[in-house]
Amino acid sequence: MSGAPGGAGVEVLCIGTELLLGNIVNGNARWLAEQLAALGVVHHRQQVVGDNRERLIEAVRQAAGRCQVLVTTGGLGPTPDDLTTEAIAAAFGAELVEHGEIWAAIQARITARGRIVAPSNRKQALLPRGAAVLPNPTGTAPGMIWTPLPGFTVLTFPGVPSELRAMWEATAAPWLREAGLAGGVFASRMLRFWGVAESDLAERVHDLLALENPTVAPYAGAGEVKLRVTARAGDAAAAAALLAPVEEELRRRTGTSCFGADGDSLASVVLAALRRRGETLAVAESCTGGGLGAALVAVPGASEVFLGGVIAYANAVKRDLLGVPAELLEAHGAVSDPVAEAMAAGARRLTGATWAVAVTGIAGPAGGTAGKPVGLVHIAVAGPDGCRSEAVRFGSGRERGWIQTLTVGESLNRLRLRLNTGAI
Amino acid sequence: MSGAPGGAGVEVLCIGTELLLGNIVNGNARWLAEQLAALGVVHHRQQVVGDNRERLIEAVRQAAGRCQVLVTTGGLGPTPDDLTTEAIAAAFGAELVEHGEIWAAIQARITARGRIVAPSNRKQALLPRGAAVLPNPTGTAPGMIWTPLPGFTVLTFPGVPSELRAMWEATAAPWLREAGLAGGVFASRMLRFWGVAESDLAERVHDLLALENPTVAPYAGAGEVKLRVTARAGDAAAAAALLAPVEEELRRRTGTSCFGADGDSLASVVLAALRRRGETLAVAESCTGGGLGAALVAVPGASEVFLGGVIAYANAVKRDLLGVPAELLEAHGAVSDPVAEAMAAGARRLTGATWAVAVTGIAGPAGGTAGKPVGLVHIAVAGPDGCRSEAVRFGSGRERGWIQTLTVGESLNRLRLRLNTGAI
């Protein structure tokens, strides 16, 4: 990154009271962040302020002291609460001047839609003296590119996502490249893990977490843990070459707990493995009530492998539909290995599937006992080589939804490991 | 808002390089904004910084000069890039001290899950001297409440949304109220709708959307539309009295499309109605693969009403398990009213449930034809008074997951209306 008086890289400033009220999620900030990362532009900070002149001026002035380029979204419309252009001009004591060609284009566009031009639209033709128009091919409000101070440029965009995107791709992205802000090319890989805690994983790879290029960063989700590897280089091939050995080393150290990368899910990985083997899958679900099946059919093309199964929430359904012997239910209770095994065997028998996964557990908040607390789940995997159930305890402090989500992931992971290793 | 040396209101600081890389959308910022708005707390600014000590310290110091309360999310984990607590302490030159009770709780929680305690977990027990613990009932990392300067308090939360939400509701929201930051007393009601477009709903109540107290604001979700009514007054009774007539008028104008309020879901409303009637429910799912059952069992206590059912993803399962005649499948195709009706009848017969809901459709992206495009779903409701299926078209441009989610909602809504009206 070339040095600048103000600072380095790009900041994003999203303007709109609706964001501060939580009426909408800030999808523009995420989209811009992705674009900047793909361009290899340094991006250290995002801000959100409301439609307030004073705070807008303060935010713009602070950014001018920190970064080379400020990208703003929102506040370019014709209504009184659209203050962006005016506030940015005021931040640097610049006068607003009307651009005749913008005003003509605004009138033509509004008239073409059969609408009446309002006097308030005229303010959209005003830009600070010295600013260039950033054309908006799909809406009325253009943006601007303005360098009010040496080494500091502001780019303004509307808040409407489709307009922002079209303008970004047509004008801003090429401009950032030409301005020399795009620092090479990034290659990135998200490795996905199940059955390992974030802290365990971090310890196993702690020396790699300290790398500077590529960087390795851990993320925790609902049961899943992820490591993102990001390499930066002059071109795509060089970035990929930097990334590859680190990915290989991470996979070597983490073994089978790494189930996939990027867009993979446990369900997609299991379905792909079964598709390769020409085998099919069924489920028998108690505490997840269908969540395991739903995770499988979330994957496009699941129908080649997944046949269906039984939601056996009530014990009578376990008995009558899945054929779980009443004696087993009586002797061991519905949440037990023998019942899970009988459920899996029943699903396999009923559907003719090669494999079946069964889950039975206590999702809570009620129904737990000292011996069988909330969070206790028995998971069985039945296949051509036999059937085996094991218990897992997700912790009685967990919420119902969390236990159900973890049960789905854990049961898919057990099937994955069974398919990998062949061990029952 | 009472004056403070530093400034007014609450700022939100979200910490995580994944946000600046655009890996995830900042849902926490939106959720917090909604909560602050509902509490009537002044909220002028949100920021995002990465896992960088220097920039974190700078952001915290700047916030201290501008606001009364800084809410942070993220960076509380055990890994080296989790810097939030340390950086906040450093921003005010405070020493970190270990809290023995946190460390004991972390160890107990990890051990209870059958995992090994890593030395890196110990850093999660460190807080700046003088800070109080903000308990995290569902995860390992607690947050803190700390007042490093007169008139400026920091509240830290993990980035995992479920943990943030549980901690916010249990601790932060009451704290903000007690601290006098909530502007007066708010009474709020979220009315929930299904089967009506946001724009239609807004037209029907457009005059009420212009009210100032209570305010009425529309929100759109996945199929569901919501209206939030918020009244502000000196005390709870006065706020409730302001709210009630507006809620009544909204319900009067929107009729049966309003299915509930606040924490209700379509599933919880249907289950409650069946519980009152002493009746039971089963499902037969093709394109949703278990998603309908999963939505039902997401509701605690579902087992009193929901018995289970069949996931009939493959046609053979529809035929062999649900007893859908092969001739019907051949003559009409799996995605048809006769098949949906036979599936519902089969689920009812197999489980003995009073009611059964069946869905069969084309979730895409493949499998659509001109006559049966992606997004076409047939939904049948079978009960003591008969069985009826109808088609719905969600649009072929929709994503698979969206179609599955809408199918779940639409099928629950049809059962709800059937129970309400008694009409087949």
Image (tube, coloured by chain):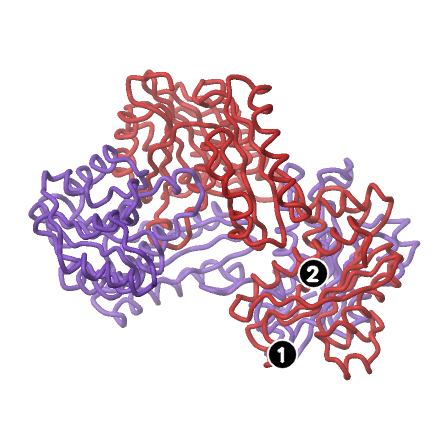
Chain colours: A purple, B red
**Numbered label attached to residue B190:** none
Q: Say few, some or many: other residues with alpha carbon within 10 Å of mark 1 (under 14 / 14 to 19 / 20 or more).
A: few
Q: Is residue A233 visible?
A: yes
Write down the chain letter for disc 2: B
Disc 2 residue type (three-letter): Gly
Q: Nearer the viewer, mark 2 or mark 1?
A: 2
Distance from Cα at disc 2 to Cα at disc 1: 24 Å
Most distant residue in the right direction: A327
Q: Quadrant of the rendered structure where residue B40 is? A: top left
Res B290 label: 2
The relative height of residue A422 versus residue A210 in the rendered view (above or below) is: below
Is A93 placed above or below B309 here? above
Q: Does residue B170 appear to the left or right of B15 in the view shown?
A: right
- Circles 2 and 1 in contact, beta carbons < 8 Å: no
> With A144 as the anchor, is B231 left or right in this view?
right
Residue drawn at (81%, 46%) of the image: B274
Q: Position of residue B317 (x, y in %)?
A: 78, 73
Q: Position of residue A353 (x, y in %)?
A: 74, 73
Q: Amino acid at mark 1?
A: Arg
Label ID, residue A277 = 1
Q: Secondary structure at mark 1?
A: helix
Residue at 69% of width from left, 74% of height from top?
Answer: A280
Please tell me which residue lies in front, A114 or A211.
A114
Disc 2: CA contacts within 10 A as few (<14), some (14-19) or many (>=20): many
